[in-house]
Image (cartoon, rainbow, N blue to C red):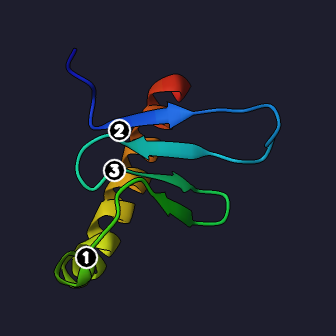
Amino acid sequence: MELPKFILGDNTDYPNAIFVIHTEFPRFIINLEDDDVEWFEEFDEHDQREIESEAENLIQAATDFYDREVSRYDD
């Protein structure tokens, strides 16, 4: 099965949360309500430096995905 790069997530236990799941390496979930990120990968020291430099781009891409999806509901 081919998964999309980003998936929206919802959970009634967290009514104000807006979850975006990134399914490609490095996999993570971000709660856009508070920008809390949970990584599904474990990183070694080399990976950690690379992830830190790329994290801002990945988080911005997740936010852009959410904005695009919401705008499609408004149309």
Residue 6 badge: 2
Give SS at disc 1: loop
Q: CA separation, marks 2 and 3?
A: 10 Å
The location of residue 63, given as percent across then percent down, is: 43, 55
Q: Is residue 67 left or right of residue 53?
A: right
Circle 1 Cα neighbour tier, 10 Å, few/some/many (<14 / 14–19 / ≥20): few
The residue that disc 1 covers is 44
The location of residue 62, given as percent across then percent down, is: 39, 52
Q: Amino acid at mark 1?
A: Asp
Q: CA separation, marks 2 and 1?
A: 24 Å
Question: Hey, which quadrant is residue 74 in on the image?
Answer: top right
Nearer mark to the viewer, of 2 and 1: 1
- Pick whichever, 25 or 55, lies toward us: 25
Residue 13 badge: none
Seen at 63% across and 45% down, the residue is: 18
Nearer mark to the viewer, of 2 and 3: 3
